Image (spheres, coloured by chain):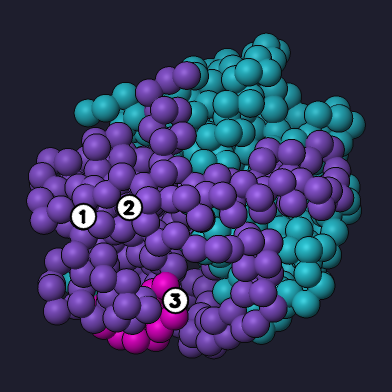
Chain colours: A purple, B cyan
């Protein structure tokens, strides 16, 4: 067990923050940690919009589905897949391939996780905000993103003002397969549902009665941000 | 500076490994570190195929564009976006939204980075293998991935048998924007090109004469794995 692994294993999303700012040298380090991430073919397709303007923060909190911590966190970073940079260097680049958006999404995840873990190791906390995609076009306009650059998600960072439990995850035997895909054992899901039911009913805040498997599959039976395809296509991405 | 940040900042991809195995408790810890990752709406849409069969490893090394370390690394993990699990629980789930593949790609990146960093903190090294997408359908067939489950990338892990330099990244002023997107300053790219030219010409292995900006934008002017859209569509993903 290393300090890095301890940091990773103690992760829980923080959604309440004190008013304390993140010291500038710490913020610089968090960004440098992001930059140190692997980059597919060294394309370096991530841009980060740091939102310091309070009016924009409050608008983004609304657009993300009224997530107030987007406005109140010490820092809010918006991760974008960005081929505008490459287009500026050479207007012949063709960004329309779905492959390139996949690269952007994976590389944004890798970079953002470096930022979050470095922040957590400094005693800070944070939470990812996929809710920005609820209103991708409006967020895009607010941040004045150019063509070939699209918003993917946000990251709140700050000093924690809560101490939530670690949320149980599906066990390794469900996610891991050896050499070929192994069929799901529904009894593993039943066990996990019972564990999650206990977690939801007994956690310190936002207690509820809920079965994980029903909750997520009911959610997936409906529409999932159906505007995202059109949004990306309008940005010159994922058409082909 | 924390040990976690030191681990993050000292990252370089490792492509040569000793024959030493990763001790099972270390591998377990690496996987637990992956599971501890944030999951969008707790959907938990990642599956990992651990490939231990040497014939499959050698075939995957070929399919990834003859990357021999895919066969020789102590461990090779394949990260997949996986809604087959949800479909098994509830056949009414609709996986066709582009949004859901974006979630999968981001969450695979976050989880894999937890695995890589925990491995690096244990003195191991690794490299991401996006090249699996060169032959996505063949990889898919080899690993017997079901409908609604698609390969995204691989991760080699093992004991390093090389000690490469850290590759310079674009500086923070190029990737970072405040409140709105800021236009690229081409002189920053010129400075970076000179730095990379020096790095490529003087590194310990695989020296070359190369200008980063030309290399990546020429690459992007061609096709980028044009089969990926069809592959994902065939898997019931990103149609809408």
| Circle 1 Cα neighbour tier, 10 Å, few/some/many (<14 / 14–19 / ≥20) | many
Q: Is residue A97 visible?
A: no
Q: Gap between marks 2 and 3, in whole Å?
A: 20 Å
Residue B46 shown left or right of residue B87 in the figure: left
Q: Left or right: A24 with respect to B72?
A: left
Q: Is residue A137 magenta?
A: yes
Does residue B70 belong to the magenta stretch? Answer: no
Q: Is residue B75 above or below residue B40?
A: above
Judging from the image, mark 3 belongs to the subunit labelled: A
Q: Which residue is mark 2?
A: A14
State which quadrant residue B179 falls in.
Answer: bottom left
Q: Secondary structure at mark 1?
A: loop
Q: Are marks 2 and 1 on the same chain?
A: yes
Q: Which mark is residue A133?
A: 3
Discs 2, 1 touching: Cβ within 8 Å? yes
At x 30% / y 34%, what residue is drawn?
A121
Residue at the (55%, 45%) spot, across then down: A168
Question: Label 1 is found on which chain of the structure?
Answer: A
Task: Determine which residue is flagged by label 1.
Answer: A17
Q: Secondary structure at mark 3?
A: helix
Camera-side mark, 2 or 3: 2
Residue A87 x, y percent position in the rendering:
40, 72
For the residues beneath circles 1 and 3, the answer to whether they share a chain is yes
Residue toward you, B130 or B52:
B52
Q: CA distance from mark 1 to mark 3?
A: 23 Å
Which residue is depicted at the point 73% across and 69% down? B232
Give the mark nearer the N terminus: 2 vs 3: 2
Query: Where does the image place residue A210, in percent across and percent down from the top left?
Result: 58, 63
- Read off the magenta span: A131-144
Residue A138: image location, x then y, percent: 34, 86
| Quarter of the image where the N terminus of chain B is located | top left
């Amino acid at each position: 067990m290393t300090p890095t692994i301890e940091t990773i294993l103690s992760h829980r999303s923080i959604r309440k923050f004190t008013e304390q700012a993140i010291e500038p040298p710490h913020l610089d380090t968090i960004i440098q940690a992001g930059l140190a991430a692997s980059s597919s073919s060294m394309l370096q397709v991530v841009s980060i919009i740091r939102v310091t303007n309070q009016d924009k923060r409050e608008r983004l909190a609304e657009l993300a589905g009224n997530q107030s911590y987007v406005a109140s966190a010490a820092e809010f970073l918006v991760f974008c897949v960005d081929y505008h940079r490459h287009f500026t260097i050479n207007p012949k680049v063709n960004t329309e391939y779905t492959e390139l958006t996949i690269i952007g999404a994976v590389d944004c995840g890798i970079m953002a996780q470096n930022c979050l873990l470095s922040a957590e190791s400094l005693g800070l906390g944070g939470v990812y905000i996929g809710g920005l995609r609820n209103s991708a076009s409006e967020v895009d306009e607010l941040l004045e993103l150019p063509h070939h650059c699209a918003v993917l998600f946000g990251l709140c960072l700050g000093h924690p003002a809560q101490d939530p439990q670690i949320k149980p995850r599906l066990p390794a035997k469900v996610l891991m397969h050896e050499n070929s895909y192994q069929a799901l054992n529904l009894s593993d899901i039943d066990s996990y549902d019972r564990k999650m039911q206990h977690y939801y009913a007994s956690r310190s805040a936002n207690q509820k009665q809920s079965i994980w498997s029903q909750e997520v599959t009911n959610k997936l039976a409906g529409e999932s941000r159906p505007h995202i395809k059109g949004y990306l296509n309008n940005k010159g991405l994922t058409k082909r």
